[in-house]
Amino acid sequence: MQQPMTFKERSRLLAAGGLGETASRDWARALSDFTLPPPGQGNSLKGGGLKSDGLEADAARARPIFATGWELLGRLPLRSQRSAAEKRAGASIVTDMADLCWRFCRAHRRALYNRLTADLTRAVRVDHLAWQAAELWPGLLPSRREVEQETTRMQKDKDGREINQGMFIGQMLSDRETGTHLVLSNLRPLEEALERSREFQKKGVIQLKTVRVEARGETGFLYFSQPRTLNAEDNETIDDQELGTDLILLHPGLRMGVLRGDPVQHPKYKGRRIFSAGLNLTKLYHGKLPFLFYLRHDLGWLNKIYRGLTGPDEVPGEPETTLEKPWIAVVDGFAIGGGCQLLLVVDYVIAESGAYFNLPARKEGIIPGCANLRLPRFMGERMARQAIMFDKTFYVDSPEAAALINEVHPREALDEAVERACANALDSGMVSASGNRKAIRVETEPLDRFREYMATNAREQAFCHLSEQLSLNLEKHWKAKERKL
């Protein structure tokens, strides 16, 4: 672990980056002199209570430090155009502010969360939690406007305002009570899903911008419809994908769900179904993918497929009472990145002969969602490390892929195979499907284990997402400079 810089070391580093000796010394001094209660000591219990004033006082003292830090960064050229000394100065400021946010949230996480959720009586989604915290405690986290302004920059020119969101959410998840409440809150059905559920039941089909949802018999089909991008994922698709999942889970006449990609327009695959190309790396490179996408993806959409929906009566620590249904994934062509992550949360996978799946996170410079948590139990830790850290591709016809793939068929036989698998599952009456899913999770991924993983994920993914190496990786492996939005 790297030793923290002293006041003099920090002051000299900032001054060397051209930020002025006086300004560098003053900010370094303010940072060094800022103290916080020991972990836990500044955390209030339910009802606010004795320590809530400490939160506000510390927030007021921290605000000018954050403001000055961003002002100093604003004096530097765009990150990709900085000299080596300027890069070191900029990176130091961003790291110091992330550390300050981490320590602040560690000292006050109970008080912060209780204030944001009215003493755990309100379910607040992870993105809304971050936006509300930014409003209540300016400077601690970036506001909506500041993040929107960041999206006008290329990813390589972002300084890292969103890193503090990862520090904040990581701390909220680190506490068992607040973290469990946050996980369960993100399993609530979307308000739009509740509003449109009756419409879906009546019409049997809803076409969203990037997703189509159909009810056929007792099976709900969720089709990915991003034909220009090989059904890649981005900040727009995540809304539709989660909404479509909610609609299928809420439909009383549907007993299972199927995930499949619609036909695409890419010249190489024109007219063919493709499951998923994973993250839209072009949008990521151009700065159009916010950090909160990752948390919404894993705490919301994928976790709903894996765990189902919670209601207001869900009590942490008791057996889960989620509304859930079994899911089948149909891998046409390939399941890359986020597409591969989906295979780890569904109950059955049918694949086209010759298809493949992989997790190219190493080439991107990010953490592949919850694959680090889930893939080892399917394929073993050694193979999981090879897939995640050494970019191994698995073809569905190979013996190694059998750990994830249940059936492999020629392209022309896939439709029939899906119908047969659904009919076979529904024939049993599905009485025990929900119970068996819950019972398996008690052993393989209890809620507390997922919460702990996501606490680490939130912190580490924030640094990965805003790292200089990410853009360099995309230019090297994705040829991002040659691709247009």
Image (tube, grey):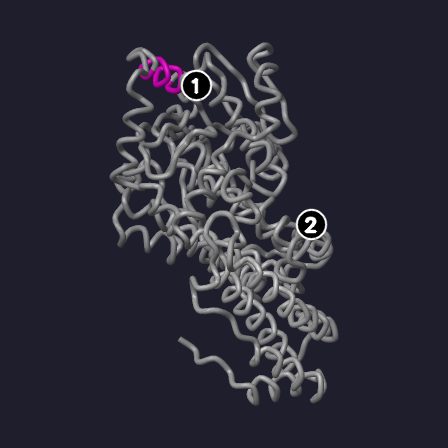
**Which residue shows up at 32% across the image and 37% down it?**
404
Q: Amino acid at mark 2?
A: Lys
The secondary structure making up most of the magenta span is helix
- Across and down, in percent, residue 256 comes to 41, 20
**Which residue shows up at 25% across the image and 48% down it?**
380
- Is residue 399 at least partly visible in the picture? yes
Q: Nearer the viewer, residue 200 or 191?
A: 191
Against 213, is 449 above or below? Answer: below
- Across and down, in percent, residue 458 comes to 48, 54
Q: Amino acid at mark 1?
A: Asp
- Split into 4 quadrants, where in the image is the N terminus? bottom left
Q: Earlier in the sequence, mark 1 or mark 2?
A: 1
- Across and down, in percent, residue 445 comes to 31, 41
User: Gap in Å between the C-alphas at discs 1 and 2?
Assistant: 34 Å
Is residue 21 found inside the magenta-colored segment of the image? no
Q: Secondary structure at mark 1?
A: helix
Where is residue 122, by image quadrant? top right
Q: Nearer the viewer, residue 476 or 470?
A: 470
- Is residue 282 at least partly visible in the picture? no
Q: What segment is highlighted magenta in the picture?
A: 417-425
Q: Which mark is residue 443?
A: none
Q: Nearer the viewer, residue 133 or 289?
A: 133
Q: Is residue 442 left or right of residue 63?
A: left
Q: Which mark is residue 415?
A: 1
Residue assigned mark 2? 484
Q: Secondary structure at mark 2?
A: loop
